Amino acid sequence: MPDFLFSNFSQHYQQNTGTVQLMEDLGRAAMMPGPVYAMGGGNPAHIPESERLFQATLSTIIQDDAQFAAMVGEYDAPQGNSGFCYALANTLSDRFGWDIGQDNIAITNGSQSSFGLLFNAFAGQFPDGHFRRILLPLTPEYVGYADVGLAEASIFDGHKPDIELLDERFFKYRVNFSDLSIDERFGAVCVSRPTNPTGNVITDDELAHLANACESAGIPFIIDGAYGLPFPNMVFTKATPLWNDNIILCLSLSKLGLPGLRTGIVVAAPEVIRLVRNANAINQLAPGRVGPTLAHRLLQDNTLMHLCDNTIKPFYERKLQHALAVIDHCMANIPVRIHKPEGALFLWLWFEGLQITSYELYQALVDTGVFVIPGEHFFPGVNDNNWRHRYECIRVNYAGPDATIEQGMALLAEVVQRYLP
């Protein structure tokens, strides 16, 4: 084998990070012999009604010679499909009353691409000599954030939450504002809403407090709405969407059931949109056309919003209740706490007093064919290694078939019982 000499830059891509593990597990689970209970990755469910609609819409596009030829045979503009951007701007204006136009929207090849650009644009070394970071005011946060920083030093500052214990073994993370300062140390603040991995939906008051603090500090507030409003609307509690020209809202088509189309969306001030446009042109010429072409069709007559409100959201609400009932049954005698599930497609399980780390528990579960995600990957920028809580949690995806959840949770209960007091 040749002994290649890689640059310092390449070191960023030679580590087995949480993001790499998460995506590798999707393929690994599919190839394992014997029964496999895939409850780890972020794949959305296969919802028959959704997939029939997507198939029928794509069939209509394919049968239109001109549309099909443009979709597969031409580059889009670097900002993304203009018809889709225009239709989405109208939808957001009509639905939420936001003052948004086509110049406020850009398309990327998936949300991970969006965050890779935005985080490195607002963190790292600045011309004034300062090194600024991205503040995550409520960790745990999405594992995919942790690995996108290209600076040699970490670009994240993770803030530990307040933990509120609730009835029926539930708990909830809340932003700890008492020791949170948003100032010139940071280039931007970011939250996911609903939060991946916990299913937390930060309250309207928390959101407004953060937005006002960011505006006062003169730094942008990034909201990751991949599971939220207006699509796919996996929100099971009261939540009012928020946007202004200091907010950068990131959306995605993935959790509609279209992760293979890799379509991310950035809603922001025109200055930010120009940055995304230029980055698209430089790094990939243009974003893909298939996702925006499909979604444009579904936005024009409000079909997409109807699908989210009347099919996708109720589907996941049912899946959630089924998963909670399974836990009640198979973990009745196990001291587990569950983060109050307010959105997304995950359960965040806290095994207080776990005698091994969540990564060691993950490895023991893989040996039985059960795939989850160890919780310790979800604390980017939190440097308190003595905080035991970060090693006591796991993320479980409940979007899979009911039988997978039932059998997988039963095996999970059996394994975790060995490592509890």
Image (cartoon, helix red, strand yellow):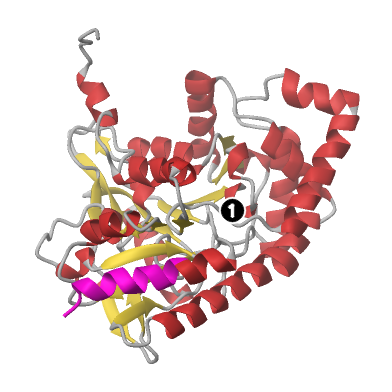
Q: Which residue is mark 1?
A: 255
Q: Residue at x 47, y 68 (%)?
A: 407
Observer able to see residue 209? no
Q: Would you call the spot at circle 1 few (<14 residues within 10 Å), some (14-19), or many (20 or more)?
A: many
Q: Residue at x 15, y 70 (%)?
A: 355
Which quadrant would the N terminus be assigned to in this image?
top left
For badge 1, the amino acid type reads Lys
Q: Is residue 402 above or below residue 420?
A: above
Confirm whether the magenta stretch covers residue 297: no
Task: List x then y, in percent, for residue 419.
Answer: 20, 71
Residue projecting furthest to the front: 34
Q: Is residue 13 above or below residue 96?
A: above
Confirm whether the magenta stretch covers residue 411: yes
Please indicate whether residue 56 sits to the left or right of residue 155 in the image: right
Name the dominant secondary structure of the magenta segment: helix
Task: List x then y, in percent, for residue 260.
Answer: 60, 39
Q: Residue at x 53, y 51 (%)?
A: 43
Residue projecting furthest to the top: 2
Residue projecting furthest to the right: 64
Residue projecting furthest to the bottom: 167
| Secondary element at image label 1 | helix
Task: List x then y, in percent, for residue 173.
Answer: 33, 74
Please indicate whether residue 313 sits to the left or right of residue 149 in the image: right
Task: List x then y, in percent, for residue 254.
Answer: 59, 48
Q: Nearer the viewer, residue 279 or 356?
A: 356
Q: Which span of residues is magenta-colored?
A: 408-421
Please indicate whether residue 64 sits to the left or right of residue 388 in the image: right
Observer able to see residue 192? yes
- Number of callouts in the render? 1
Which quadrant would the C terminus be assigned to in this image?
bottom left
